[in-house]
Image (cartoon, rainbow, N blue to C red):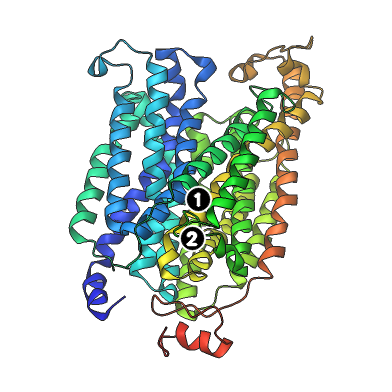
Amino acid sequence: MTQETQARAKPNIRVVLFGLMIAMMLAMLDNMIVSTALPRIVSEFGGVNHFTWVVTAYVLGTTVSTPIWGKLGDLYGRKAVFLTSVVIFLIGSALCGMSGSEMLGGTGNGMVELIAFRAVQGLGAGGLMVGVMAIIGDLVPPRERGRYQGMIAGIMAVAMVAGPLVGGFITDNLSWRWAFYVNLPLGGLALLILATSMHLPKYRTEHRIDWLGAGLLSVGITAIVLITTWGGNEYDWASAQILGLAALALVSLVAFGIVERRVVEPILPLGLFANRNFALISVIGFLLGFAMFGAMNFLPLYQQTVQGASATNSGLLLLPLMFGMLVVSLVVGRAITRTGRYRMFPIVGGVVMAVGMALLSLLKVDTGKVESSLYMLVLGAGMGFLMQTSMLIAQNSVEQKDLGAASGAATFFRSIGGSFGISLFGAIFANRLADSPAGSAFAGGTGEGRGMDLTKLKELPAQAREVVLGGLSDAISHVFFWATIITIAVPVLAWFIREIPLRTANAVPPPDASGEEQAEVALGKAPVS
């Protein structure tokens, strides 16, 4: 970044950051809001057999597009590409809100339309998530990024808890369609702010899009997401459909690897994985998504069934998780900016997160809300150590020209890990519950409460209710036990990360530079060839 560019960018950093925080909030908040509105959507459109696709289509669009958006930003400039992703997201939001209405003719299948438009929305959201992190990487040198990325991580924490609350309010007082329309004024504001105030450095690079690689990667990712979504639910794990998807994913990704080694401008440069820090943080990101998103899905279930909280109150009960993540993210970000050191944070974060998962594996029927809140506070603190630090290490490991690809890859591995976690932990939960004394209540057996609706737990006789709640709490705690096992690998891997001084300018030392030369470049005391 030239001195002239820095002079232009710095006065606007707070304004730009405000716009970026709105964009990230929209991308993270949307899925949480929609999950609350789903029952009302199903009651209007029907299609209960396909309603999960309202969520899956968004996740699929986001996951498939993240590496591609990152690379497009490297090629054509991050500002134009990011603003394009905002526009696509807003178009998708508007179309979702109009699904099945007279505004679109009113003759189609509302659920099918909504699923298709959710995929469009997800494509835009992928660009929002990658773009925010990459733009911060362009505007702020690594030494200072921790503070800003800590704020973004805090926004993500707020979105996780605020989503269900906002979604419930909108659905109850307005219409489920406003779960999508609410994005339009907020997204329009972010678009206006960023279009007028964001000035990014320009990096020269060849404009050759690896269309074949992008296509093969999209096919492979789609197959993987469908496996994790359908496996054990729609189809048996050993079914022809799942095995066929596994074969398609394997062939596509192998072909993708071959193509990426031959093209001039790969969509995901495989050479990035030769960097030890980048390879390690990619695996850590996968495990983080696996444990975090997979296990966290069961907290509201525990609160609403075992602890008897309402849907809205279960969102409030997640506040300790958000608080722990928010506070630690901000503190760690400032500490990294002040000291320039980061290696210890993913190690400490992995240990604290594993402790939090282990504590949650102790959840029982009689666990009080205060006790479970303390457990969630510990888990949130561990997540706060890891969320922004993993992105910071990924960006500090690559050259500026590959910043978008690195940001996209880091987001991608976390998303794929989440998809695997949700699927695997769902299977663990279902199998544990089926083997419990309460299993007959959910598997169509002969016990009291057969084929039970969880909303009618209070109507059961006391003894039957105790058996069912015991089975539920045991199955949920079993999920957190396995999440603990997976999370333990995070600090072990983080131990092998090398502490390379964070650069005070957006430049990367040559890969063959000595440790002393790396330190000089990082501190802005030596030129970069």
Circle 2 is placed at which residue position?
Answer: 406
Residue 444, percent from left and from top: 73, 12
Circle 1 is placed at which residue position?
Answer: 322
The residue at the point 57 percent across, 45 percent down is 416
Q: Is residue 467 above or below residue 248?
A: above
Q: Is residue 280 above or below residue 58?
A: below
The residue at the point 32 percent across, 23 percent down is 175
**Left or right of residue 441: residue 346:** left
**Left or right of residue 416: residue 6:** left
The residue at the point 24 percent across, 55 percent down is 194
Badge 2: residue crowd in 10 Å (few <14, some 14–19, many ≥20): many
Q: Quadrant of the N terminus?
A: bottom left
- What element does badge 2 sit on? helix
Q: Residue furthest front?
A: 262
Name the kind of residue labelled 1 in the image.
Answer: Met
Q: Are marks 1 and 2 in contact (CB under 8 Å)?
A: no
Residue 496, percent from left and from top: 68, 70
Residue 297, percent from left and from top: 59, 38
